[in-house]
Image (cartoon, helix red, strand yellow):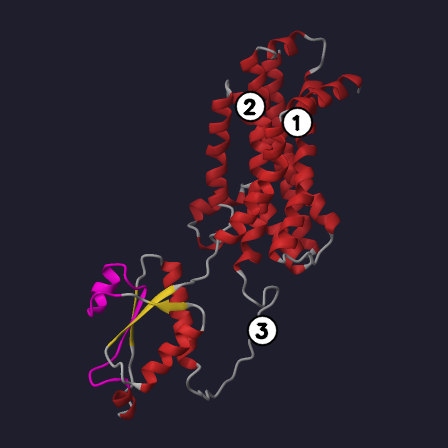
Amino acid sequence: MKTLWGFIRKEFRQTLRDPRMRILLFLAPCVQLTIFGVALSTEAKNIRLSVVGGLSDTTLQEIHRKALASGWFIPARTSSQDPFMQIQNDEADAVMVTPVGGLDRSLGRGTGELQLLINATNVTRAQGIERYFSSIVRSLYEFKPPLSFDVRVLYNPAMRTALFLVPGVMSMLVCLITILLTSMSITREKELGTFETLIAAPVRPEEVILGKTVPFVLLGMSNIPLIVGVAMALFGMPLRGSLWLLLLSAFVFVCCTVGIGLFISTIARTQQQSMMGGFLYLFPSVLLSGMVFPVENMPWVLRVFSYINPLTYFIELLRNIMLKGGDARLIVFNILILSAMALLAITVSWRRFKTTLS
């Protein structure tokens, strides 16, 4: 234990003695969470809306007025009366085109039709524009279908994008910090030539491995309260479940990512290689985790990679604990999978590291 404690103190001093590293560890995640939480959004906003023809139609003017008053649409500045050219020239995101003779006359004939041209180069944004416009048009009339629906939106009644994306950003930041720090710690020893000193020292491989991993597990866990606090204070992120369950889930996830970082360090020979290896792992891991795009929408070939991705299970745990209060079966299932992944990553890394030492 004395040798292990010496390793841990050395790693803490070596990591935290640089003021810039302390900023990267504790301040940068809070800043990144704030920026990503504000910038990342799947909601369609500031939609440039144009009208072609029928400026004297009262119905058309009412639809246009309601659209601008909704806060989703803004007037488009156009240089052409051709609706297709307005879309092609990127002057408008949506264009209302009235039928021949005007919308009022068309409604009087009982065949009222209003065409809406939408720029669908961004499919998600185009779908949002269509939904917004349909709700505005429906609000002008009273439909009485034979069956009525009472719709209730659970867990996120305001439909705020931040409540969906922030847990994913939190997971990504923890993954980024732990993997990069762990992988670069050992390759730094190789570059400085102190790794040979470790091999020659009268210490067991287990002590070296624990001394190289325990500090980064503790540093990774120290970021959890900071990130959760920023999410709750700035974005109104609820914590409906148990804080202890959240910390337990984070601990298992951090152990898994530290094990992955240790594995990368056994392959890389320089800090540059370990950094590149970390990013090569992180980018597909984030894209296939369900952070932005639903896993269920992916082809089954890619879905297999999502199901062997630790980030997928931690994001699901965070969303379930913070938004839903925590379902016992889902939490136990995901924690068990993360534990198995952590055990596998640490075991493989330990064997490769032991071989390197010997």
Q: Position of residue 286 (x, y in %)?
A: 50, 43
| Lower position in the chain sequence, tag 1 or tag 2 | 1
Disc on the earlier residue, 2 or 3 = 3
Looking at the image, tell me whether mark 3 or mark 1 is earlier in sequence order. Answer: 1
Identify whether 200 is placed above or below 282: above
SS category of the residue bearing label 1: helix
Residue shown at 36% from the left, 63% from the top:
126
Tell which tag, 3 or 1, sits nearer the viewer.
1
Number of other residues with Cα within 10 Å of mark 3, as a class: few under 14, some 14 to 19, many 20 or more: few
- Residue occupied by mark 1: 16
20, above or below 249, in the image? above
Give the magenta part as a residue range: 78-103
Q: Give the number of the disc on residue 43.
A: none
Decide: few, some or many residues near mark 1? Use Cα within 10 Å; few <14, some 14-19, many ≥20.
some
Task: Give the Cα separation between the discs numbered 2 and 3.
Answer: 49 Å
Instruction: Give the residue pinned by disc 3.
Output: 152
